[in-house]
Amino acid sequence: MTAPHDAADAPDATDAELGTVRDLVAASGRIAVLTGAGMSAESGIPTFRDARAGLWARHDPMRLASPEGFAADPGLVWRWYAERRAGVRAAEPNAGHRALAAFQRAHPGRLTVITQNVDDLHQRAGSEGAIRLHGDVLADRWFDACRRHARGGNVCDPAWAAPGEPPACAECGNRVRPGVVWFGEPLPLAAFEAAERAARGCALMLVVGTSGAVQPAAGLAGVARHAGARVVIVNPHDSELDGVAHHRLRGTAAALLPRLFGAPGAGTLA
């Protein structure tokens, strides 16, 4: 198991820059935090690109993360996700996850987490109500619509499926797939609408550990700014959203979020 990167290299962000954003956190009644793959990578969960290294490098991502790829070779896709699930279960929340959860407990109703990540690290850190834009890699659902439900019955539970790679319904052969959003699929409507409401209603949005390349999630920063919020990027690298931001803090989530949100040992907010 790879340990979370709590002890990160010294961040590039200066004390003055951190102080400015800490003041924004203290003054903002509602805060939205959009998190991406970089934050989970600090806990040892590979990004989508990194997860395709080694034995998986020869496979087109459209074969591993699309409905068409699953239909063509469900066993291949199921085995790849089984490996990803094992990595998620072995990982632990890092200091950034814990800082957000601690702030939520100390300030109920002020902070909403919106995540593009399909792991459960925010939940295990203690964050409540995290909006999951791209689904849950540890959850199962049916690949096709349940035929029993189409005939007026109740939807079969994927947990009842017969074992296999992938498991399948013993009655109709419907296959089980991971509960994530694949290329070409729409985001869950309820989750995206909730994320848009949080973006429009916040006074401050932090965009943490995301390249800003995946739409429509990346557009939430622009929604927040257009509605009057201050936008802050927290990332050790350049992102496609840097032009939307009022402030850019260079550093990792594990290093900077405890300093911004007043985690124990990192200073407290007034």
Image (cartoon, grey):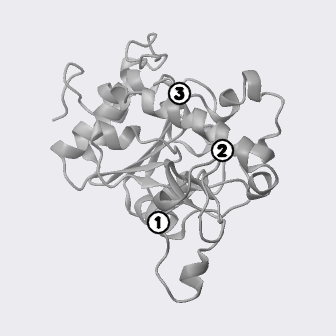
Residue 124 locus on image (x, y percent) = 32, 39
Q: Secondary structure at mark 3?
A: helix
Q: Mark 2 belongs to which amino acid?
A: Trp
Instruction: Give the CA distance from mark 3 to mark 2.
Output: 22 Å
Q: Nearer the viewer, residue 267 or 264?
A: 264
Residue count near mark 3 (Cα–Cα under 10 Å), binned few <14, some 14–19, many ≥20: some
For disc 3, the marked residue is: 41
Quadrant, the C terminus = top left
Which mark sits nearer the N-terminus, 3 or 2? 3
Q: Mark 3 belongs to which amino acid?
A: Ala
* Residues at discs 3 and 2 in contact (Cβ within 8 Å): no
Q: Mark 1 belongs to which amino acid?
A: Asp
Which residue is found at the position 79% from the left and 47% from the top? Answer: 62
Which mark sits nearer the N-terminus, 1 or 3? 3
Residue 103 locus on image (x, y percent) = 24, 40
Asked whether the viewer can see residue 248, the reply is: no
The numbered mark at residue 78 is 2
Which residue is found at the position 72% from the left and 54% from the top? Answer: 183
Residue count near mark 2 (Cα–Cα under 10 Å), binned few <14, some 14–19, many ≥20: many
